[in-house]
Image (tube, rainbow, N blue to C red):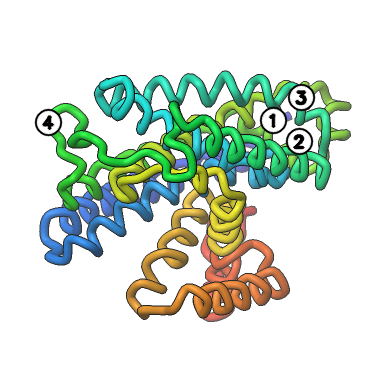
Amino acid sequence: MIDSKQVGVSDRKMSGRTAREASSVACALIVIAVFAYTFSDPFVVTLAGYTCAFALFALSINIILGGVGEVPLGQCLFFGVGAYGAAIGMGKLGLPFQVSVFIALILSVVLAAIIGVITLRLTGAYFSIVSWGLTGVAMVAATNLEEVTGGPLGLFGFPPIEIGPLQLSDPQTYFAVTATILLLAILFLVALRRSPFGAAMDSVRQNRHLARSVGVDVARVRLKAFMLSAPFAALAGALAVPYTQIVTPEVFSVANTVDGLLMVLLGGAQLVVGPVIGAAMFTLIPQAMNLDPNIRILVFSSIIILIMMFAPGGLHQLGVALRDRFGGKTDDDRSR
């Protein structure tokens, strides 16, 4: 028998979360508008746009890591597909940017379906290593297919990158577009986590054997999650092109995936906006402090080690712990 008090508490919690999310979205839209059209330094605004694009890539990693509990070291494969898809479509085929991106997204989903059927039979380190190996194959292919990819020098010298009337060469427009796409992606992932598929992903992440025993098709859920993550990564790669203005085989480097993983771990894998927080800290803070790249690696590596030791949930866990210690728990927290 269902307790009406429990239902009431659940309804209040849900409505409270919905209200907080709605207010967060409104605040985010205001911040995007103000930042995009008032900030004076074009480089900083462009860097903020690139940060939003790479945060989208971190979100794609978190769909697998925070969703089904696997470490996708080969996620940069789809990032490269998006970057090369946009570059080849514009530079070689003369297609509009948005058409090139759409084709790259479709290709990434098809590629993820093919790779997923093969690699998702593996779990843990085996899956990570095999997916990492595929990125090496992609990098070698991009280096040698010079007529298509430009070889080691890559592709550059693109026509003006635009989406309809929006010129992505303009820093404010570029930031506004990438930030809006990132915001829509966050809203989609929030809704996904509340859906039955999100619950199935969570059950697989916690214990796939137990999930299978209660009727969850684990193989199908893992494959769907993998296919879902691919277009996010490909879109991130395509949106990075207006910032980099060049696409080389290095986009398939596992170093990109490692950077994305660090962003996820820094912000918190169990929080939808965690990777976004990590991306902002990983990209903007070193630029503001003018840190040398080698010093940046040392600083963030040390931070990640400390977080994994004392707060495996990332900065979000630290924030909740500090709130509970100094501000007291909220009614929602007590009712959990």
In this rendered view, identify the residue nearer to me: 303 or 93.
93
Residue beneath disc 1: 200
At a point 53% along the width and 59% down the height, the residue shown is 263
Residue linked to disc 4 = 165
Q: Nearer the viewer, residue 328 or 46?
A: 46
C-alpha gap between disc 2 and disc 3: 19 Å
Which one is nearer the viewer's eye here, 325 or 210?
210
Query: Can the viewer see residue 182 in this picture?
Result: yes
The reply to whether dot 2 and dot 1 touch (C-beta < 8 Å) is yes
Does residue 13 appear in the picture of this structure?
Answer: no
Q: Which residue is mark 3?
A: 118
Q: Amino acid at mark 3?
A: Ile
First in residue order: circle 4 vs circle 1:
4
N-terminal-most mark, 2 or 4: 4
State which quadrant residue 221 falls in: top right
Task: Give the image location of residue 110, x and y in percent.
Answer: 57, 19
Gap in angstroms between the C-alphas marked 3 and 1: 21 Å
Which mark sits nearer the N-terminus, 3 or 4?
Answer: 3
Name the amino acid type tagged 1: Ala
Specify whether 146 is left or right of 27.
right
Question: Which residue lies under the disc numbered 2?
Answer: 204
Picture coordinates of residue 109, whole percent (x, y): 54, 23
